[in-house]
Amino acid sequence: MGIKGLIPATLTPFDAQGGVDYDELEQHLRRVCSASGLYGVAVNGHAGEILALSSEERKTIIARARQVIPPHLKLVAGIEGHHFDDLIQQGLNARAAGADMLLVLPPFDVRPYRMLANHPESVKAIFQRLNDEVGLPMIVFQYGESSGVAYSLDALRAIAEIPQVVAVKAACFSTTTFVEIMNAVGDKLDVLAASDA
């Protein structure tokens, strides 16, 4: 895919009643887009308070961002869900609202599912469904090792074979782990350094 440049994670502002402040969101997005060296802009990530947003709010944020973000910049939309049909629906919603790429947060980030992050077949099955049913390029969000839901290197190798998986956001806590990810999948995927790590 050749991702070159920055993909800043944007914030989601809220009003005093706890609803999304869409006007402030658009101003924030314009400020972010004025920076140089951007490849794209990400919405609905952790900084974007994805867990506090309804499905409808997530869609609206993507649609409003698409109106503001210049067409030469990629709109990357975070999706998350622990029910796999819901995760697919989140991807379809993002595509319909104008996203160019998905940032897929780990669907195994709940205690009963955590062991599946180390099970290559389970991980691959989820990303294969997203590939087949949504059809947008995907950035895999690799959480840090201490999270309990970091994908194993074998799982990353398995999903690196999926055509629409184009990058890994490596939010790892050591350069050793980053290099291990690079060595495992760097010949097939872009490995992105995450500022939060």
Image (cartoon, rainbow, N blue to C red):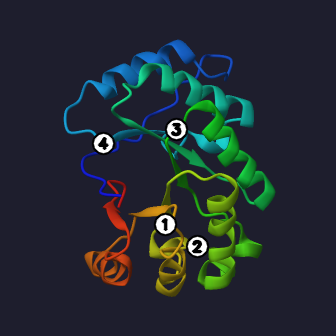
Among the two numbered marks 4 and 1 on one chain, the one whose residue lies closer to the N terminus: 4
Q: Provide the residue designation for mark 3.
A: 48
Q: CA distance from mark 4 to mark 2?
A: 28 Å
Classify residue 160 as left or right of residue 14: left
Q: Amino acid at mark 3?
A: Gly
Q: Residues within 10 Å of mark 1 (few under 14, many from 20)?
A: many
Question: Is label 3 in a helix, a strand or a loop?
Answer: loop
Given residues 34 and 174, the one toward you in this image is 34
Q: Provide the residue designation for mark 1.
A: 143
Q: Position of residue 130 (x, y in %)?
A: 65, 59
Among the two numbered marks 3 and 1 on one chain, the one whose residue lies closer to the N terminus: 3
Among the two numbered marks 4 and 2 on one chain, the one whose residue lies closer to the N terminus: 4
Up the image or down, 131 lies above or below 41; here it is below
Classify residue 68 as left or right of residue 124: left
Q: Provide the residue designation for mark 2.
A: 149
* Mark 4 in CB contact with mark 1 (< 8 angstroms): no
* Mark 2 in CB contact with mark 3 (< 8 angstroms): no
Q: Amino acid at mark 2?
A: Val
